[in-house]
Image (cartoon, grey):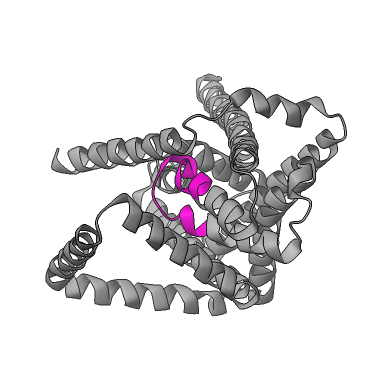
């Protein structure tokens, strides 16, 4: 019961955080301006391409996970891997982090040993994404270091204007004390976490084709980037954003998603809007519209693919159960 209470509390807090951020970001925003993006015919070409990039990203993610499953001696069909990944992202859009657990449990329903090994592959997959995120952020900082420093300085200045300086420093001090207080009793857990992290990284070398795995990781993140970059031509006011600028925006948005809210709602929008307005002088209304449309298209795509995967998965389960039952009832 205590664990369930913690999970419910985590869900409520993460959802509330996302709602609060969205209300704060979009206060005073005229949502009718969104119709301008969808009223221009040539924009649909870019929208369709962005949606296609999202589909390819999830398919590549499924193939990467299947490769990890095979290294753990778990063999499933490509179609089943795609279905489970689509289902997991649908669940994550409502409940953060629950999709990975559900995906692992559905690999072999009722087989705890296989589900545990499958969850281990999901952990390795997430560690691979962390490494990719570090590479993306490092590349963005290398090209746009001054812009990133400017963002940090503007954020600190905004905080100082919003609250007295002494209150800001007290708050930072309290956060540091809380972090230390939470860390000291868990030194063993941190050591175990770092050990698992290293084991996850080295597990890539035990794959049959490490190069293929790295290639899939690269393809996934390229497609994720394309989902943002391909929407830029829909906004004439953002025509000055070049490829490197888009990479910088994508890196900041990817960092924002680290905050556990359903589907990244709130932190993702905050990171995109602040980067566009503060680093590239984009009009606030355009920045908010771009963030909402880009993330909204990704969310709609995830939900549609997830629902479709749910239908096909349970249809196969139901037909398989009926076939097995009819064979058992047929006369010998």
One can see residue 170 in this view: yes
Left or right, residue 106 beside residue 5: right
Query: Residue 243's quadrant in the figure?
Result: bottom right
Left or right: where 264 falls relative to 230:
left
Q: Quadrant of the N terminus?
A: top left
The answer to which of 263 and 323 lies nearer the viewer is 263
In front here: 83 or 38?
38
* Residue 154 falls inside the magenta stretch: no
User: 285 or 94: which is nearer to us?
Assistant: 285
Q: Quadrant of residue 109?
A: top left
Q: Which residues are magenta?
A: 254-270
Picture coordinates of residue 133, whole percent (x, y)? 54, 66
**Residue sitting at x 25%, y 73%:** 190
Q: Is residue 132 visible?
A: no
Instruction: Determine the residue positioned at 62% across, 54% down.
Output: 61
Please tell me which residue lies in front, 211 or 36. 36
Q: Quadrant of the C terminus?
A: top right
Q: Position of residue 230 (x, y in %)?
A: 76, 48
What residue is rendered at 83% in x and 29% in y?
40
Q: Is residue 261 magenta?
A: yes
Image height of 298 relative to 259, above or below: above
Would residue 46 appear left or right of 31 to someone viewing this image? Answer: right
**Residue at 40% across, 47% down:** 97
Position of residue 55 relative to residue 199, above or below, is: above
Tally the marks.
Answer: 0
Residue 216: x percent and y percent?
A: 67, 64
| Residue 270 placement (x, y as % from top left) | 49, 47
Q: Quadrant of residue 176?
A: bottom left
Extreme right residue here? 42
């Amino acid at each position: 019961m205590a664990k369930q209470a913690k999970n419910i509390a985590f869900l409520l807090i993460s959802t509330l955080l996302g709602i609060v951020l969205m209300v704060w970001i979009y206060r005073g925003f005229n949502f009718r301006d969104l119709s301008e993006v969808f009223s221009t015919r040539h924009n649909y070409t870019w929208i369709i391409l962005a949606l296609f990039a999202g589909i390819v990203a999830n398919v590549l993610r499924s193939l990467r996970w299947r490769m990890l499953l095979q290294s753990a001696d778990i063999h499933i069909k490509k179609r089943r891997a795609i279905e489970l990944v689509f289902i997991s992202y649908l669940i994550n859009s409502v409940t953060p982090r629950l999709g990975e657990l559900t995906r692992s449990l559905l690999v072999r329903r009722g087989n705890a040993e296989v589900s545990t090994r499958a969850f281990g592959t999901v952990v390795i997959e997430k560690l691979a994404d962390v490494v990719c995120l570090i590479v993306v952020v490092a590349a963005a900082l290398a090209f746009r270091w001054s812009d990133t420093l400017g963002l940090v300085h503007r954020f600190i200045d905004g905080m100082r204007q919003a609250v007295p300086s002494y209150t800001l420093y007290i708050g930072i001090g309290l956060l540091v004390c809380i972090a230390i207080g939470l860390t000291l009793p868990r030194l063993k857990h941190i050591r175990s976490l770092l050990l698992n992290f290293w084991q996850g990284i080295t597990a890539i070398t035990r794959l049959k084709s490490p190069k293929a795995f790295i290639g899939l990781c690269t393809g996934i993140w390229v497609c994720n980037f394309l989902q943002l970059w391909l929407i830029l031509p829909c906004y004439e006011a953002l025509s000055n954003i070049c490829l490197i600028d888009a990479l910088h925006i994508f890196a900041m948005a990817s960092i924002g998603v680290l905050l556990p809210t359903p589907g990244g709602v709130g932190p993702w929008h905050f990171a995109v809007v602040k980067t566009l307005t503060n680093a590239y002088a984009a009009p606030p209304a355009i920045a908010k519209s771009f963030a909402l449309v880009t993330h909204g298209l990704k969310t709609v795509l995830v939900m549609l693919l997830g629902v479709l995967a749910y239908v096909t998965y349970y249809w196969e389960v139901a037909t398989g159960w009926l076939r097995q039952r009819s064979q058992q009832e047929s006369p010998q």
